[in-house]
Image (cartoon, rainbow, N blue to C red):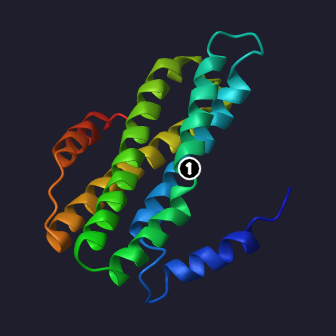
Amino acid sequence: MKSYRTKFKGYLDDVGKKMPSPGGGSAVCLVFCLGAGLMEKAMAYSFEPNNRLRKYLHSARKLRGKVYPYIDLDGEVFERIMQSKGPQKKKHIERSQRIIIDTARSSLKLFRLAKRVEFSIKKSIISDFYLGARCLELALGGCVLNLEANRRIFGIKSKYTGIFKRHLKSWQRY
């Protein structure tokens, strides 16, 4: 097995430092990608090559690929927010909001997909599948917290916060 520990060390060290980024938004995106990856693994082990369910595996990979760049982009956008003023600052705040909303929507899409395939997952890998679902739950909860913080800090209210909160409650069985 490869050693991944050293590759994550720099990121983990930076998350723990007294510096603006990487922070919560970046961590939410990373948690989403971990959850998606675990679910992909469970699907890959469970679906036969010609199985009609393979399209769900492809969809999960696509969602992870969409959110993955946000791990770094969130911090870059936050730095621009801190350095900008006036209309430029507002533009960067809106971009930050879109990253978080897009991550939350991707969480919802992947969770709906997971509900469709849950009973097709082999029992030998189901724990990875459920751990992935918990990561998605955590990512969505982090998105809600991020949106609420942006409302308090920047005065931007999102119509999605309540929607995402309601969906979190429906995930309790996982």
Which image quarter holds the N terminus?
bottom right
- Quarter of the image holding residue 72? bottom right
Which residue lies under the disc numbered 1? 33
Q: Nearer the viewer, residue 117 or 72?
A: 72
Q: Nearer the viewer, residue 88 or 46?
A: 88
Total residue callouts: 1
| Amino acid at dot 1 | Cys
Vertical side of 28 occupied by 104: above or below:
above
Q: Is residue 138 visible?
A: no
Which image quarter holds the C terminus?
top left
Check disc 1 and report its element: helix, strand or loop: helix
Would you say 103 lies left or right of 37 here? left
Would you say 151 lies left or right of 75 here? left
Which residue is situated farthest in the front direction here? 87
Residue at figure coordinates x 58%, y 82% from the top left: 13
Residue 34 at x, y percent in the picture: 58, 51
Q: Is residue 145 visible?
A: yes
Residue at figure coordinates x 65%, y 79% from the top left: 10
Rate crowding at label 1 as few (under 14), some (14 to 19) or many (20 or more) other CA atoms within 10 Å.
Answer: many
Would you say 80 lies left or right of 22 here? left
Residue 119 at x, y percent in the picture: 53, 18
Residue 148 at x, y percent in the picture: 20, 61
Q: Nearer the viewer, residue 138 or 28?
A: 28
